[in-house]
Amino acid sequence: MKAEEKANEMISRAEIVAKEIKLGSIEYAEDVLTTVEHNLKSILQEIERNRIELNPGK
């Protein structure tokens, strides 16, 4: 019975760690995507400014 309790405890800990890792990876991915989105918006704004400079009369 003692071995079964120990095994269940190990499984519970492993599940907690797995959940923490999953949440951490989701948070990291969100941060990366936010940074990429910000950079892409900046690039698109720069492209628009450059196009306007090339054709100021349009």
Image: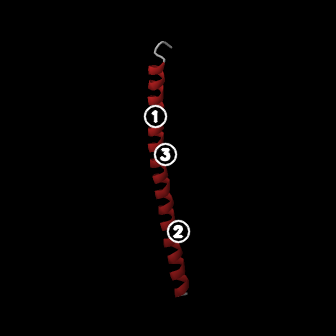
- In this rendered view, identify the residue nearer to me: 2 or 56: 56
Disc 3 vs disc 2: which is toward the camera? 3
Q: CB atoms at circles 1 and 3 under 8 Å apart?
A: no
Q: State the image coordinates of residue 55 (x, y, percent, origin top left).
A: 48, 17
- What's the CA distance linking mark 1 and mark 3? 15 Å
How many circles with numbers are drawn on the protein? 3
Q: State the image coordinates of residue 26 (x, y, percent, origin top left).
A: 50, 54
Q: How is the image coloured?
A: secondary structure
Of callouts 1 and 3, the N-terminal one: 3
- What's the CA distance linking mark 3 and mark 2? 27 Å
Q: Residue 43, labelled with which disc?
A: 1
Q: Residue 15, labelled with which disc?
A: 2
Q: State the image coordinates of residue 15 (x, y, percent, origin top left).
A: 52, 68
Q: State the image coordinates of residue 56 (x, y, percent, origin top left).
A: 46, 15
Q: CB atoms at circles 3 and 2 under 8 Å apart?
A: no
Of callouts 2 and 1, the N-terminal one: 2
Label 3 residue SS: helix
User: What residue is pinned by disc 3?
Assistant: 33
- In this rendered view, identify the residue nearer to me: 6 or 53: 53
Say few, some or many: other residues with alpha carbon within 10 Å of mark 3 (under 14 / 14 to 19 / 20 or more): few
- What's the CA distance linking mark 2 and mark 1? 42 Å
Q: CB atoms at circles 2 and 1 under 8 Å apart?
A: no
- In this rendered view, identify the residue nearer to me: 30 or 58: 58
Pick the quarter of the image with the N terminus: bottom right
Label 2 residue SS: helix
Say few, some or many: other residues with alpha carbon within 10 Å of mark 1 (under 14 / 14 to 19 / 20 or more): few
Q: Residue at x 46, y 58 (%)?
A: 24
Label 1 residue SS: helix
Amino acid tagged 3: Leu
